[in-house]
Image (cartoon, helix red, strand yellow):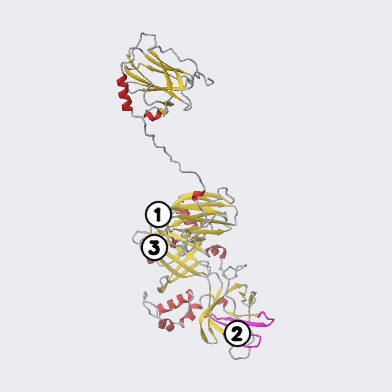
Amino acid sequence: MLKHPILIAILLIALAASGCVAGQPVSPEQMAAVAPTVVDMVSQIAPQLAGTYSVAASDGAGNTRELSLKLTPDGNVELVTELADATQLMESGTWLLSGQGDVVVTLGTTEGQSIVEPRTIRLAVEGDGLVATDSVTGSTLRFSPGMLAAAPAAEPTPAAETEPLAEPSTEPSAEPPAAAMVEPSQQNEPILNRTFLSFDRAADGSSLLRALTFNDDGTVTLTSDYYNDEPVVIENGTWEITDDGMVKVTLTGQESGQLYLLPTVITFTVDGDALTAVDYDASIYGSDGLTMRLAANVVGDETAALITVDLQAGFPLDPTFVSVNGGGDLNAAAIDPECPGYVNQQPVVTVNWSGTADFVEAFFVSDDDPTLVVVGPDGNVYCNDDANDHLQDPVVSIDNPIEGQYRIWVGSYARNQLIPGVLVLTTNPDVNIGTFDLGSFIQRPAVPEVLEEPTPVVDMEAIQADIQAESGQAQLQKLGAPVGTVQITAEGMIPLFQLGLDNPTCNGLVNESPDHVFDWSGAKDALNVYFEGDSDATLLVLGPDESIACSDDSAETGNMNPQVIVNNAVAGTYAVWVGRVHPESPVTGTLYITDDASAVPAMLDAGQ
């Protein structure tokens, strides 16, 4: 069975030409019936490479074997290996030119017998020759144009005794192949290993995202997300550079296994980071056209990240972490088919990276099962689901990160599910998803932001009742003379604020009941209350109208004896508390009450 997408596409085109109905599955009988038409189709790929190429190679034991590779214009290939004992091995199959410009040889027949597992050899085009890697010695085999002399016929050699060419490396060759890119090759080379996006509208007006991923093996994937509950549509196919420098995409079927009888072909022009379709099916992609841009650029232009972080290699706050929500309505497979979960169209974090580091790692810590998507400044896409089989948090690690902008999405497995968590960025090898503990960064007991208001320990209604009961016991004296002097020892332990008084200037430690109660006629302009003690004291005066006046020290004079002057005080019963500042010792002194506003307490400074 032919496995390469381009050959499958050719067969399907031939099936369509033979009258098969679109949408019906392709049977093996139908494929066999149209197989001869493959010759005509493949001959259009790269006839300029058809010919015979040969090379002499060591078998690793000092012997020389000769290889002859014949590429025919009809897409068939023959590989003849002549061993040191003059025996020959004949292998045959098909060949094609990949999107990268390499010659891909698929050998499925040995000595006329089909083999179970066909093998593939990739040869780079260099000048007028072909280059591959020798599996025996690991050396480079350079096939030159020309025909080897035919060797005498011999008995077939079992395949087990042959030494086949190595499976080709997927790494690009050190020197670009001469035929890998048709001019303008410099313009189209960035397409390799890139994903392009477009945000469009479907025929019904709903949102539609398309993601086109190019692979350097000549395959391509087109993912379409219609933002509904249906799975995204993933189409597979091939791509190539045309003679006039355009990019031709041929979609041959869907990942679900459905093959197209008529492949879908889109031809793009390349302009910087954009692909613009110039030849396409308008009934599928709309009459407005189809333009796609590098994923790294289109998301940056369409939507700004929720959070932007500037990081330079060696940043002191390593690890750096931010609190974000994961999840969204965009299937992450639209960004890259390998990416699971649903993400927001907006990246949650954009990191502007500068400097050099051995690696940078991003991981997301949560109580759920999130996913992670990172698009680098070069358009490369990095995805992860679980760190391991037992740890559902995702991790993306990038070696030697290049400078530029990295866009990060956090995904969820259900559409529009929100997953709160912490995104961590680090270049510290000692920090990882398994050891990270957010609680270890700030080690202190929890302290409430707003302290609860203290519950008053004193029943003010009871105090008011006691004040009324004592009303009338003190009598006013004549004008200019003190109402009285009272000897008081302040030794209370109740903070003044626990009396439930709405006055933040009141302080000191007092008794539950007032130290003195007196009546005031209200006939004079001022009520003057002060205290002269042997150490620092405070004073509280509560009026009959529930007015409150407090005093501690005189800021102007530095006098530590407190004084309260109430102007135009209303008539009624007043209560006085004398408080102390230091709970270790009581304060003893005299309380004065007068209508002389000029009277002041004796001086008490801090040294006494």
Which numbered disc, 2 or 3, marks the residue that appears first in the sequence? 2
SS type, badge 2: helix
Distance from disc 1 to disc 2, alpha carbons, whole Å, reads 60 Å
Tag 2: residue type?
Glu
Image quarter for residue 517? top left
Q: Nearer the viewer, mark 2 or mark 3?
A: 2
Residue 216 percent location from the top left of the image: 53, 68
Residue 579 percent location from the top left of the image: 43, 24
Which residue is identified by label 2? 161
Q: Nearer the viewer, residue 89 or 356?
A: 356
SS type, badge 3: loop
Distance from disc 3 to disc 1, alpha carbons, whole Å, reads 37 Å
**Label 3 Cα crowd, 10 Å radius (few <14 / some 14-19 / many 20+):** few
Up/down of 290 relative to 536, above or below: below
SS type, badge 1: loop
**Label 2 Cα crowd, 10 Å radius (few <14 / some 14-19 / many 20+):** few
Residue 424 belongs to magenta span:
no
In the image, which disc is placed on residue 371?
none
Which numbered disc, 3 or 1, marks the residue that appears first in the sequence? 3
Tag 1: residue type?
Leu
Which residue is identified by label 1? 418
Contact (CB < 8 A) between labels 1 and 2?
no
| Residue stretch rendered in magenta on the structure | 59-88
Question: Does the rendering let one see residue 264?
Answer: yes
Question: Does the rendering let one see residue 593?
Answer: no
Residue 63 belongs to magenta span:
yes
Tag 3: residue type?
Ser
